[in-house]
Amino acid sequence: MNKSIIRLSNIIILSLLCNCAIAQLKVAKIYSDNMVIQRDQYVKIWGWADSGDKVTVNFMNNNYVAMSNSDGEWHVMLPKMKAGGPHNMIISSENKTKNLNNILIGDVWLCSGQSNMEWPLAYAMNAEEEISNATDSNIRHFKVPLTYAGEPQSELAGGSWLSCSPDTAGTFTAVGYFFARAIREHHDVPIGLLNSSWGGSRIEPWMRKELLSKNGEHPAEAMVAAAKKRSDENKIRLEKIVGPLTGEDKGMVDGIPVWAASNFDDTDWQTHKLPGLWESQGLRGFDGMVWYRKSITLSKQDLLSEIKIGVGRIDDSDITFINGNKVGGLTQQYNTPRVYDVNQQFLKEGENIITVRADDTGGGGGIHGEAAELFIQIGNDKRSLAGEWKHRVSAIHESTGFSPNQTPTYLYNKMIHPIIDFPIKGALWYQGESNANEAGAYIYRDLFKTMISDWRKLWGVGDFPFLYVQLANFMAADDEPAESNWAVLRESQSAALDLKNVGEAVIIDIGEAEDIHPTNKQDVGLRLSLAARKIVYGENPVYSGPTYKSHTRDGKKIVLTMDHVGSGLQVKDRYGYLKGFALSGPDGKYRWAQAIVHNNKIQVWHPEIDNPIGLRYGWGNNPHDVNLYNQEGLPASPFRIEKL
């Protein structure tokens, strides 16, 4: 090797070494352009540099200096500041400078939970109009990436703050956005939404190992084993319903969709009414592939027009065929209406077969949405495809026993622990559906209180406001009073009201029987904001619907006194019938009861029960007909009294 090449190599090595040193200045990913930092609290800015480096943070014309320790960690503390902005921040070491722009000082709300919190504005009710009106740049949003770890981590996987605009708001948490919008209608303070949520997650993944460990064992190990056991038992149960199940798609052979052929014999297939998730139609607990077929008849005149089909919303993915020819398909878009143009060459006069392969990887599955979203449009003529479709299960996705969003501590370690030094005003929580099984629904009350108290301890800013959403009504309504895990879960959620600075948004009146993700997120955010205005912002609105306070007996009648009646109780029924109450006598059997509002109290009775023993209101998976409100329009919270 000649000397010139050696000199050039040395220069390149030195340059790389210098660049490596320069690159060591890092700022925690929670800090970026457009961020909101918490007013009226000390604010920690932190990151990493070479050991012993001097790091200067310049903010609002003040310098804050730190020296990185032996591990390269550095941090500075900013003083308490009033709401305002925008401001810029300059973070520098000897060799590198980072500029963070368009920073606001305001209130930061941690938004956490499962899919109904993660649910983006783009999928909410009236999404197009809401997004076009989302012009308040004083609302900012940070989405923590869906990541997990077996042990607590110091840094997020990524993410950045976005300023609200029609170009960005569609990705915001819808519940968080409507909460922020409602707060800003009453208080001119910037709102930051720190969105750390994961669809389908249980509560245990959001909690620290120390809270869940037993005998020093990591709680994840037992839960993974239990999940595998449940999966095996579930498969055995399902096979009794649909026959042998494997992971191989029987409807697709060597890439050919044999079950989509127009001449395929489907006479032994069962039927489903669509739209409707398959869990509500006999396939509870099934994750896998189901094929659907429906016959339509087209005339010679029909074939002269442009034709498109709508096959509803498909949880999670689909491939859609006509007469064996693929016309469309989407992957992992469980709430997107499918509308596909149809090539005229695929159609024929007479009978045509529409086939949909639905593939669900977890949670609800199948074709759902509104009946109007299933149609065939021939020119300007739209014909409904809702109703009976034939279906057959083709494959099962067998669980390995490991799902990060089901595994204790795994989400806390990577999605909460890295941000506990980032000051917040409070937390918004929408979760519980994944814990509403027989055992989990009751123990949730202890887990929930424990998590709230622990998060407050970790953030170290006192009993910060914790506002949560009670589960909505969901699934088929009961013809007769029945036991309900979802009702127990709601009761467990309400038990958290014993803690200080906790508020509950009751949405028992805005759920959807066929969709675990009700699209009316506007009222959810609004009801959360009422609790915040009461607990946080020094106002005195009526922030809760009626809740049970006490009761007395008047002969055969039970007379209930309620809290949070506001301007008075009201019954939303044109005839004044109060629904949703059930009574039990000495036999323990609950029966639908009669009830009225009288003198701002509630009288409940049953003509055949002389000695009522138990009382329930709104007790069911979907108590769809509950109609007790206060005059301010907030619904009463479900409750039970097992011993009157």
Image (cartoon, helix red, strand yellow):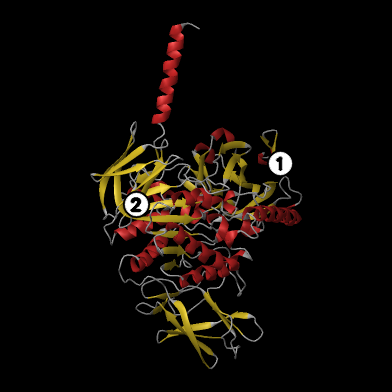
Task: Please say if 331 is above or below 576.
Answer: above
Residue 339: percent from the left, percent from the top? 50, 43
Which of the two marks, 2 or 1, is nearer to us in this view?
Answer: 2
Residue 634: percent from the left, percent from the top? 40, 71
First in sequence, mark 2 or 1: give its number.
2
Q: Is residue 220 left or right of residue 382?
A: right
Name which quarter of the figure residue 97 lies in.
top left
Does the image show residue 607? yes
Q: Nearer the viewer, residue 248 or 341?
A: 248
Secondary structure, mark 2, is strand
Task: Please say if 404 is above or below 507.
Answer: above
Q: What residue appears at the point 60 percent right and 39 percent down from the top-left corner?
A: 322
Secondary structure, mark 1, is loop
Amino acid of disc 1: Glu
| Label 1 Cα crowd, 10 Å radius (few <14 / some 14-19 / many 20+) | some
Q: Residue furthest left?
A: 61
Q: Is residue 644 left or right of residue 599?
A: right
Residue 248 got which mark? 1
Q: Nearer the viewer, residue 526 or 32?
A: 32
Amino acid of disc 2: Val
Q: Nearer the viewer, residue 124 or 232?
A: 232
Residue 136: percent from the left, percent from the top? 30, 50
Q: What residue appears at the point 64 percent right and 37 percent down from the top-left corner?
A: 324
Q: Residue tagged by mark 2?
A: 43
Image quadrant holding the C terminus, namely bottom right
Task: Please say if 489 is above or below 62.
Answer: below
